[in-house]
C-alpha cells in the first residue's frame, strides 16, 4: 500500500464577522491555489480593535495537504 | 469544611457547523455518562477539509468533574 | 519619526452565548477605562458547565494599547 | 522479563491548608478506587481567594498507575 | 450526518527492545479493554538505564478512541 | 444575567520561610490595593541562595480580580 | 565570506513500518522537488490504529534547505 | 528582614534602529510613570517590514518593579 | 471592505556580524522573491562557534506576506 | 565594571517530608561541591507513591552559580 | 531512610543508522565517565541530510545520575 | 565513519553594552575551560535596570561541544 506525504503551510485569515469566518476565509483563499487540502490546525487567534470594537478577527492556522 | 477532588478527562467533539458547536457536542455526549461536570478548557482546535470547505470542526477539550 | 510604546494587560471576558461574545464583552468593558486599544490575542478558552450545558464561556485575552 | 504498561489520569486536589496538602488529598482520594498508583507529576498550582486570604489551594496533577 | 465524539487517554508503554516497540506494547495492552482506538500521539520518550545500557524504553502516548 | 469581566496581574512574592508563604505574602500585599481578588495561578517558583541556604523563596503568580 | 539563508518547510511522512521510516519517506519525497536539503527536526510523532494495530506511523518534521 | 513584593507588566517597545533599542525605548517610557523598575525579561521579538526593509523593530518585554 | 489573507514562511538568516544582521539578511534575501512582506517574528537565535568566537549568528524567523 | 558569567546545572532533590524539603536537600547537596550558588528555578515537581501515600517528593531545579 | 540527589546533563548522540541508535551511542559514551546513570529523557530529534538521504540522526537527551 | 557525541551546558553571560555582547562574553568565558565548542542556542534574554536604564544585559544560552 502507498504511504502518503503531506505538507503544512501556515496562513492567517481575517474577517470582520467572527473567528470561525476568519478560518473559513483563509481556507477558501488557500484552496484557490492548493489542491488536496485535508485538514487545518488553529495556531493563534487575535484581532485588531478600533474605537473599542473588533474591526478584524485574525486567525493563524496550519493547513495540511497531500503531495502528489 | 470539605475539600473536593476533581478529575479531568480529554475529549474531542466534532461539528459540521462551528467550533463552538463542536465544544457543545463534546460536553453533551460526556454528560450522558459523567455526573457533576464543572468546567472545560479548550486544548486544540482543528478540522477536516473537503473540496476547499470545512467538513468537520474538531475541538479537543479537557472537562473537569467532581469525584463523589 | 516617533517610536510608539504599547502596554498589554490580560483580561477574562465571559458570555452565556459564545466564545466570540466573551471576547467582545471583555473588550467593551476594557475600552470604558482604556484608550487607544489596538489589538487582542486570545490566551485561553474555557467555561463553566451546569447540568450538562455551558453556563458561561470564559476567554482570557491580552489587549494591547498605545501609551501616550 | 515483562513489560509493564501504565496509565495516567489527571486529577485536581484542593486543601485549605497548603499546596502539598492539596496533592496529598488528591492522591488519597484517587487511591480509594485505583490500585498500583506509582507516581505523580504536578501540572498546575492555583487557588481561590476570599477577602484577601487563600480559601482553597488547588493543585492539578497526573498520577500514573500500572495496568494489570 | 453524525458528529463523532472521541476520548483521549494517556498511557505509558515500555519495551526492552526499542522506542517503537514501547508504543506498540502500549497500544496492544490498551486495545484489550478499549474498543474503536483510532490514533495515537507521542507525548514523551524516556527510559531506564542499568550499567550503561538501556534496560527499558518508556514512551508516553495519548490514544484517541470513538465514544459509542 | 450579567457577564463578569476579570483582570489578571502578575506579581512576585517572596518569603524567607517557604514557597507557600511567598504566595500568601504576594496576595496579602496585592489585596491592600485591589478589591475582589478571586483566584491565583502560580507561574514560576525560584529563589535566592546564600552560603548554600535559601535566603528567599520567590514565587510569581497571576491573580485574577473582578472589574466593577 | 558569504552568509547563507535557509528556508524551512513542514511535511508529514507516513509509513506502515516504523517511525524512522516515516521520516525517511518524507525526506525522500521532499528531495524530489527541493534541492540542497540540509537538516530535519522532528515536530510530532503520531499514527493511525486499526483493530488494535498501528496501520500508519505519521511523523511531522521541518526540513531546512539553502536558498540559492 | 522584610519580604519585597514585585509586580510585572508587559510592554512593547519599538525602534527604527535595532532590537536592543526597542527594549531601551520601552524601559525609558515605562520609567516615566513607574518607580523602582528592577529587571526585564524579553517575551517576543518581531517587527514591521516595508519594501523589503525593517521599518520598526518591536520587542515585547515584561518589566518587574517593587511595590512600595 | 476586503479581508486580506496572509501566508507565513520560516527562514533562517545568518551573519558574521550580529543577531540583528542575520535577521536583516534573511529578510533581504526573502524579499527578492516574495512581494508584500509585512512583518517578521523571531523564532530562534543560535550560532556557530569556531576557536571560541562566534563565526556565524543564525536567526530563524517567520515572515508574513499578503496573498494577492 | 566586570561582567559576571553564570552556569546553570539541573539537579533533582528528593524528600520524604515535603516539596520544599526536596528543594532544600538538592541545594544542600549541590553546595558541597559548587561554590557561589546564587539562585534556583523549579523545573518540575513529582514524586513516588507507595500504598496510596507519597513515599518521596522529587523536585527538579536549575541552580545558577558564578564562574570564577 | 536516605534521600538521593540526582543531576541531569544534556547530551546529543548521533548515528548513521537510526534514532534509537543515536540515543544508545550517547548513553554508551556518557557512561564512560559518569557512574550511576539512571534514566534518560529525549529532548529533541533531528538530523543531517546529504543528497536526499539522512547522513546522521541526532538526538538530544537528558540523562539523570545519582550524586554520591 | 565515526559518530560524534556532544554535550550541552547552560550559561548566562552579562554585559553593560548589548544583548549580543552578553552572548559573546559568555562564550569567551566558557571557551577558557571547554574545548571544541561548536554552537550556541539562546534560551532567555533579560536584564537588570537601575534608575530607568539597563545596567546589565543577561542572556542565558546553551553551548554545545564535542566530547573527546
Image (tube, coloured by chain):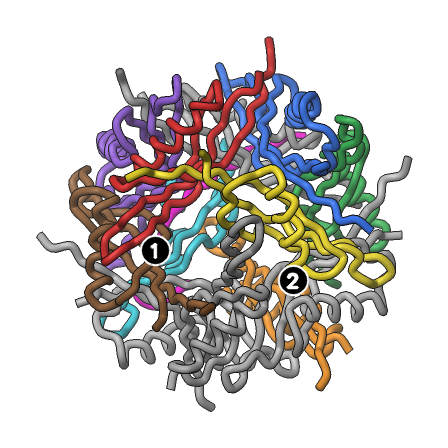
Chain colours: B yellow, D red, E blue, F brown, G green, I orange, J purple, L cyan
Which quadrant of the figure has residue J62?
A: top left
**Which quadrant of the view contains residue B34?**
top right
Q: Residue at x 38, y 48 (%)?
A: L11
Q: Is residue J24 visible?
A: yes
Numbered disc 1: secondary structure:
strand
Was residue L5 drawn as part of the magenta stretch in this picture? yes
Question: Which chain's residue wears label 2?
Answer: I
Nearest to the observer: residue E31 or residue L27: E31
Q: What is the quadrant of the C terminus of chain F in the image?
A: bottom left
- Alpha carbon of mark 2 to alpha carbon of mark 1: how far? 41 Å
Q: Position of residue I65 (x, y in %)?
A: 68, 74
Front-most of residues L59 and G36? L59
Tags 2 and 1 touching, CB below 8 Å: no
Observer-nearest residue: B22 or F63?
B22
Magenta residues?
L1-20
Q: Circle 1 is placed at which residue position?
A: F39
- Local packing at callout 2 (Cα closer than 10 Å; few below 14, some 14-19, many 20+) is many
Q: Position of residue F66 (x, y in %)?
A: 36, 66
Taking L50 as reference, is E36 above or below it?
Answer: above
The reply, left or right, for residue B31 in relation to residue G21 is: left
Q: Which mark is residue I11?
A: 2
Q: Secondary structure at mark 2?
A: strand
The picture quadrant where one finds residue J13 is top left
Same chain for labels 2 and 1? Say yes or no: no
Residue B35 percent location from the top left of the image: 53, 40
Q: Is residue F5 left or right of residue B3?
A: right
User: Which residue corresponds to the image point at 28% horizontal and 73% vertical from the top-left?
Assistant: L53
Q: Which mark, residue F18? A: none
Query: Magenta includes L57?
Result: no
I29 left or right of E12? Answer: right
Q: Residue furthest top?
A: D1
Amino acid at each position: 500500500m502507498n504511504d502518503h506525504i503531506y505538507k503544512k503551510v501556515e496562513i492567517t485569515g481575517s474577517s470582520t464577522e467572527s473567528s470561525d469566518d476568519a478560518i473559513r476565509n483563509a481556507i477558501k483563499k488557500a484552496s484557490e491555489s492548493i489542491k488536496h487540502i485535508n485538514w487545518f490546525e488553529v495556531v493563534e487567534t487575535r484581532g485588531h480593535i478600533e474605537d473599542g470594537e473588533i474591526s478584524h478577527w485574525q486567525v493563524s492556522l496550519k493547513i495540511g495537504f497531500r503531495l502528489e
